[in-house]
Image (cartoon, rainbow, N blue to C red):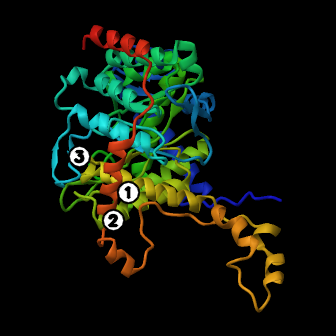
């Protein structure tokens, strides 16, 4: 019996559309060029045949882009802190996690935001460690109570202490990224083990339009050297730092991403690279950048389709909202972005729990999004069509006089067919009133409180913890 179902997926571009976008990205790189503010990167590009001008502008020929696409791995396995396989970054596999560096955190009880502190980083990591549909973690918060040059490293330490799930980290420069890598080698008991079963990924960005700063490229090159999976994702703003048209927005973002890919692969052929863009859209009536404008979704879907076109792992988004609190708008937008990411096959989807245009993090929204992800994953499984699932024999046995409620066919397929919510309600109005008439946010808050009170992540061994702390004490930002 074949239980494999046809997996549903979304498609917004024709093959001709993809070819046009690809050619346009190559034209941008070869005729407009990129500014590269890093001497080693410039030397690498020049020796590969690129034209380098005095103003650090570089023209990159198309063959280098094609070669980089071919040499970058199409499959990246990401593992847990202890080395167990955790995420398959390939094909249409979708994984979900939080975002990083939020200036504010939303208090669950008071529904008021406060400046994020290091405690918020640890609390978010511990909650995410407990939630079954959160596959990786980012810091969620940028700690205002830690010196800026230490904040990324300290956040990594706190995340590792509070969760064994994979981490996507940010860093100020090569110095603290190197310290993060050293801590990861301690946790994995050596560089070779970490390289074979990577535990963390690094997120870096160029600056739109067409600029690649020293710090971003320095971290990109370090990741190439150490074979650390790296996300190099521009964030062009439509109507501000990129064309307002969706096709132009996507073409520019592709070109900026591929400049990083070329440098990365020339430095270390076959090093793991994750492509993507953050296609922000500036509302022309308010000058506010939106995570959830329809044009954002369309540009985002286009870049995910392009990642499949290139057969490269993709950087995605899910569970976000522009609303200021976890309300109806927030749940709708978080649900829609999660649905789109899953059905398009975006591999590594971050920013779960983001509110307020990416300024505020909400643990309640992370809890709600965990439920949303679970239901959307059920949709992604599709519909198995075979003799057993069609159930003609069961229909014959039930006939006109019986019912399916007590038939063995129902019992056999009940748990594999029906998705059961843990947070959303399906009770009658009467039962809902008797239980105190709890709204979705009330139920999310109750679940959050229970997780905070009861969940204890797997501890790092005392020996490793001491060694990590020694490295933290030695760090000089």
State the residue in front, 301 or 134: 134
The answer to whether one can see residue 442 in this image is yes
Q: Nearer the viewer, mark 1 or mark 3?
A: 1
Q: Earlier in the sequence, mark 3 or mark 2?
A: 3
Classify mark 1: residues with Cα within 10 Å, few (<14), some (14-19) or many (20+): many
- Residue bearing the label numbered 1: 368
Say what secondary structure mark 1 lies in.
Answer: helix
Q: Earlier in the sequence, mark 1 or mark 3?
A: 3
Residue found at x 35% / y 17%: 174
Classify mark 2: residues with Cα within 10 Å, few (<14), some (14-19) or many (20+): some
Separation (CA) of disc 1 from disc 2: 8 Å
Residue found at x 45% / y 45%: 134
The mark found on residue 359 in the picture is 3
Contact (CB < 8 A) between labels 1 and 2? Answer: yes
Horizontal side of 225 relative to 169 (left or right) equals right
- Residue bearing the label numbered 2: 440
Horizontal side of 424 relative to 73 (left or right) equals left
Horizontal side of 399 relative to 373 (left or right) equals right
Say what secondary structure mark 2 lies in.
Answer: helix
Q: Earlier in the sequence, mark 1 or mark 2?
A: 1
- The x, y position of residue 206, in whole percent, is 35, 32
Separation (CA) of disc 1 from disc 3: 19 Å
Q: Nearer the viewer, mark 3 or mark 2?
A: 2
Q: Quadrant of the N terminus?
A: bottom right
State the residue in front, 51 or 282: 282
Q: Quadrant of the C terminus?
A: top left
Total tally of numbered discs in the picture: 3
- The x, y position of residue 451, in whole percent, is 37, 46
Quarter location, residue 28: top left
Classify mark 3: residues with Cα within 10 Å, few (<14), some (14-19) or many (20+): some
């Amino acid at each position: 019996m074949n239980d494999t179902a046809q997996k549903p997926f979304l498609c917004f571009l024709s093959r001709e559309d993809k070819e046009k976008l690809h050619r346009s990205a190559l034209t941008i790189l070869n005729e407009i060029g990129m500014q590269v503010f890093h001497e080693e990167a410039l030397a690498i590009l020049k020796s590969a045949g690129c034209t380098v001008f005095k103003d650090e502008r570089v023209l990159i020929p198309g063959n280098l882009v094609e070669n980089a696409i071919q040499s970058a791995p199409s499959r990246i396995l990401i593992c847990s802190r202890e080395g167990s396989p955790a995420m398959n970054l390939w094909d249409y596999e979708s994984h979900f996690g939080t975002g990083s560096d939020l200036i504010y955190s939303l208090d669950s009880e008071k529904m008021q935001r406060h400046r994020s502190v290091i405690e918020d980083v640890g609390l978010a990591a511990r909650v995410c460690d407990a939630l079954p549909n959160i596959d990786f973690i980012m810091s969620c918060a940028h700690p205002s109570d830690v010196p800026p040059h230490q904040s990324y490293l300290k956040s990594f330490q706190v995340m590792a202490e509070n969760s064994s799930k994979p981490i996507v980290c940010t860093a100020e420069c090569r110095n603290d990224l190197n310290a993060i890598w050293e801590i990861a080698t301690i946790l994995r008991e050596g560089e070779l083990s970490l390289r074979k079963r990577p535990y963390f990924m690094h997120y870096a960005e160029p600056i739109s339009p067409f600029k690649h700063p020293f710090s971003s490229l320095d971290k990109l090159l370090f990741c190439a050297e150490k074979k650390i999976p790296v996300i190099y994702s521009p964030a062009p703003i439509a109507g501000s730092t990129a064309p307002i048209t969706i096709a132009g927005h996507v073409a520019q973002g592709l070109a900026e991403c591929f400049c990083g890919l070329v440098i990365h692969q020339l430095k270390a052929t076959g090093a793991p690279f994750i492509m993507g863009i953050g296609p922000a859209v500036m509302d022309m009536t308010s000058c506010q950048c939106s995570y959830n404008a329809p044009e954002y979704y369309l540009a985002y879907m286009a870049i995910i389709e392009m990642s499949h076109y290139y057969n490269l792992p993709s950087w995605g988004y899910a569970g976000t909202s522009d609303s200021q609190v976890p309300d109806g708008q927030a749940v709708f937008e978080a649900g829609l972005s999660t649905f789109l990411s899953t059905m398009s096959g975006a591999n590594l989807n971050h920013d779960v729990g983001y509110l307020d245009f990416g300024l505020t993090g909400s643990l309640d929204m992370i809890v709600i999004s965990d439920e949303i992800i679970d239901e959307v994953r059920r949709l992604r499984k599709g519909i198995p069509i075979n003799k057993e699932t069609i159930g003609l024999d069961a229909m014959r046995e039930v006939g006109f006089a019986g019912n399916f409620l007590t038939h063995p066919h129902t019992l056999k397929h009940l748990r594999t067919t029906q998705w059961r919510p843990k947070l959303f309600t399906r009770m009658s109005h009467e039962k809902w009133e008797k239980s105190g008439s709890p709204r979705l946010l009330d139920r999310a808050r109750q679940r959050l409180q229970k997780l905070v009170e009861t969940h204890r992540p797997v501890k790092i061994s005392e020996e490793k913890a001491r060694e990590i702390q020694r490295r933290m004490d030695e760090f000089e930002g």
